[in-house]
Image (cartoon, rainbow, N blue to C red):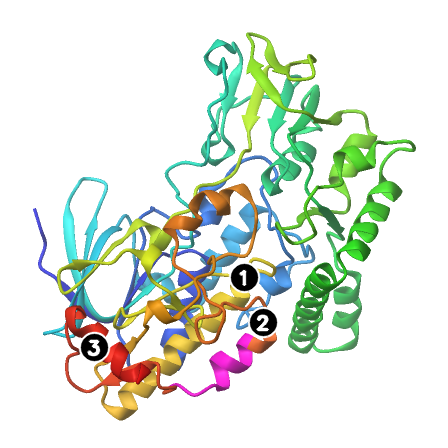
Amino acid sequence: MKKSAEHFDVIIIGAGLSGVGAGYRLQTRCPGKRYVILEGRAKIGGTWDLFRYPGVRSDSDMHTLGYPFRPWQEPEAIAEGASIRNYIRETAEEFGIDRHIRFRQRVLSASWSSEDARWTVETQDDEGTISRYRCNFLYGCTGYYRYESGYQPEFPGSEQFRGRFLHPQRWPEDLEYRGKRVVVIGSGATAVTLVPAMVPTAAHVTMLQRSPSYVLSLPQHDPVADLLRRIFRLRTALRLVRWKNILINIALYQISRLAPSRMRRMLRAAAVKDLPPGYEVDRHFSPRYQPWDQRLCLIPDSDLYKAISSGKASIVTDEIEKFTERGIRLKSGKDLDADIIVSATGLRMLALGGVQLMVDGEPIQPKREFIYKGTMLSNVPNFAFCIGYTNAPWTLRADLASSYVCRVLNHMERRGYRTCTPLCDAGSLEPRPLLNLTSGYVQRAAADLPKSSSKAPWLIRQNYIRDWFTMRLGRVEDGILQFAKTASVARATMAQEVRAVGD
């Protein structure tokens, strides 16, 4: 059964951190535009509503992960998942964004018609009912993780294990781990969060890693933020804290790339200071790769180091030979007994939330396209999507993307344009990966994601300040983003236009 289509100026896909922020920017900067947010789940929050494992928290400070238009005011700079979820929901309620959200509307496909210059979006609810929506501009705020399941390697003998075996992306509400022996497989952000969170009630928690990750400890409460609150008015103080943290993020990344040996020494020295005397720091906390080849793992107030120092947590760096009835046998010959095994082995990435895009009946394959200014897909009309930084909090680029979309929409309104399309001759560009990380979850999906390139505007920078000037102050009509007052040509003739622009 299909319902009749509703028409909106803008459709936003996703009611998580990005989607709610996009709704705010639209209604404040483009107040005449009618918009709707289509959310596949039953609640606001996106990733922060999905993940419910013990200790789930932000992997960056909330002064920069939070919205610039509604600064984070809680004392904890590193916040728990429930607090972030409440923050997103309260933001949506405060500004009336929640009234624009349609829940349980999982977007299946979006089809662009050049004849009509509009998108038709198909959704499906929990009962299987198909609904259609139409819009002039489509904005994807889905993130890039697959919500249905995380990455789960095939472990030999896993079916023999008599205890509980699970992935943190599907954490059971009834899991009781009090007094249990727990093994957490992995060394990334999820693993370093789970271990200290489970230590207070578990008998013992072992983090089993094939290779180490870089770990950075930051204070749970920002002392500089507390000082600035006492000196300045609250809003001024929060803005100063936000920019202080932005600059620190940029500085840490630049040091990592320009002087990696120095950053390695800094991180090692911090670990030595907080771990027990004689601890094998070089074995368990010295990765083979350089800092920021993969994301740094953030731990608040050295909680992972403290858990190890207490004796209730340990790290084993080894490889798995097989699962046994009682736990895991390692390639070194050692056995790890366990009542519960948690496979914190990473996430699975998904381009554009799995939405099938069509332009004039032709399917769009994201892996063949390039990204324009980090937010639009090459040769796809009236479409943008949101991706965050790899080296800084997600919301920094997400908010820039939403602000840029509003700039484009207002420009089109003033000039009477109906379409905008970033034209691209893919043959003239050097393809680069969308995300500049060597992490397993990125490498597994790299071939299926859109591409970056080596030159602007197809180059995805990892620098908020440079992007701020480009997105906020750069020319909208730059010769690549093409505007038209009539319905744009079909995609079949797009190559001719691209060649004409190149000539």
The magenta span reads: 467-476
235 above or below 343? below
Q: Say whether marks 2 and 1 touch (CB < 8 Å).
A: yes
N-terminal of the pair, mark 3 or mark 2, is: 2
Residue 210: where, in percent of width, then height?
64, 30
Q: Is residue 290 left or right of residue 59?
A: right
Residue 467: where, in percent of width, then height?
54, 75
Q: Which image quarter holds the C terminus?
A: bottom left
Callout 3, which amino acid?
A: Gln
User: Viewer-proximal residue, 167 or 476?
Assistant: 476
Q: Where on the picture, by quarter, is residue 179?
A: top right
> Disc 1 or disc 3, which is closer to the eye?
3
Callout 2, which amino acid?
A: Tyr
Callout 1, which amino acid?
A: Tyr
> Disc 3 or disc 2, which is closer to the eye?
3
Q: Is residue 88 left or right of residue 485?
A: right
| Residue 497 painted magenta | no
What element does badge 3 sit on?
Answer: helix
> Pointer 1: what residue?
389
User: Viewer-proximal residue, 196 or 201?
Assistant: 196
> Is residue 93 in sight in this rendering?
no
- Residues under labels 1 and 3: Cα distance? 34 Å
Instruction: Residue lying at the far right in this picture: please name it.
Output: 277
- Residues under labels 2 and 1: Cα distance? 8 Å
Mark 3: few/some/many CA within 10 Å (<14, 14-19, 20+)? few
Which numbered dot is residue 464? 2
Which numbered dot is residue 13? none
Which numbered dot is residue 496? 3
- Residues under labels 3 and 2: Cα distance? 35 Å
